[in-house]
Image: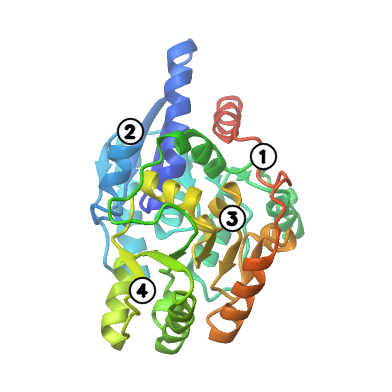
Amino acid sequence: MKIITIIGARPQFVKAAMVSKAIQEINGKAKTKISEIIVHTGQHFDSNMSDIFFNQMAIPKPHYDLGINSLTHGAMTGQMLENIEKVLKKENPDWVLVYGDTNSTIAGALAAKKMHIKVAHVEAGLRSFNMEMPEEINRILTDRISDILFCPTDTAIKNLVKEGFENMGVKIVRTGDIMLDAANFYRKYASKPSEVKEESDFVLVTLHRAENTNSKAKLKGIFSALSKISSTKSIILPLHPRTKQYIDKYGIELNPKINTIPPMGYLEMIWLLSNCSMVITDSGGVQKEAYFFKKPCLTIREETEWTELVKSNVNFLVGSDESKILKTYQHASKKIFNFDTNLYGDGNTRALILEELMIS
């Protein structure tokens, strides 16, 4: 069986690493061999956003690196579609495996579907119900044209059922979350960033979504809140290139007490998540990782696709409003949290994915 894996953004590198490891394990034991061809679209191309993940996590080097980035959504997706189609014609795979909700995801799924190649979508069924998010458009369209939908949660399956997917001739499988596999596997390799002096009791912040960075008012509100938090608690902020660009564009002066560091590799992020006391983020993946490492999370968005975290009272939607961020931070700082609920499976998602692909 030949699988083509489409990746392009750093969360996808982490997810795909676990499936690649499971393929290697199967190939070492089973008579039936699985051939995996990795296609990197180039969506994340900075060395701290891409190369470091392949090196740290021992991900097989991509067979194809398309080098497509720094374009508008339409131009980027179009070029990816065209180039992925060329790869599919050459390789003729049995399956195309796509992850998450990026432009790389929809381009890979659409190229495969138009060539009548089966598509499997990992992290299917997620919904933020905000159609202004490019990710929401990508995930809905990818779900609709996939042949197997690998869902991380019961909520994801309920979303698909409400949308009528049970009548669409698609296989829906509850696998758990592939990111839990990665967190469990790599936590023993966690590496403290050289730029960090703190050992514990700091707040980890990540900030990169366009809905926040592209708005001067929102970005100023967020950093004003972070500045006030930093007067009593250490803050560590791995600074995304886009966020830095807009900080400079808007002339926002950062409080020197906010420790800004370069984007981190996965092993450094694992260390930061393990040792912080709280997470503040607009990332979907980091919200889950905060839960995996039993840390409360303030989500600087108006909605989240990970609604079960909010219902479990370990994740709080605060948007970009300074007063709401500060009020919720004070509340979360004093609260005792329960992380015992099993929301995301048992950490064996990679094996379940391959089992389904081999029998379908």
| Relative height, residue 12 to residue 347 (above, below) | below
Q: CA distance from mark 1 to mark 2?
A: 24 Å
Q: Where is residue 295, by image quadrant? A: bottom right
- Residue 244 location, x and y as percent? 29, 73
Q: Which residue is mark 3?
A: 295
Residue 73: give its label.
none
Q: CA distance from mark 1 to mark 4?
A: 38 Å
- Residue displayed at 74% across by 47% down: 341
Mark 2: amino acid: Ala
In front: mark 1 or mark 3?
3
Q: Earlier in the sequence, mark 1 or mark 4?
A: 4
Q: Which residue is mark 2?
A: 58
Considering every residue shown, the one lying at the far front of the view is 232
Which quarter of the rendering shows the N terminus? top left
Q: Secondary structure at mark 2?
A: loop
Residue 345: give its label.
1
- Residue 83 location, x and y as percent? 29, 51
Q: Earlier in the sequence, mark 3 or mark 2?
A: 2
- Residue displayed at 64% across by 46% down: 151
Q: Where is residue 175, by image quadrant? A: top right
Q: Residues within 10 Å of mark 3 (few under 14, many from 20)?
A: many
Q: Which residue is mark 4?
A: 257
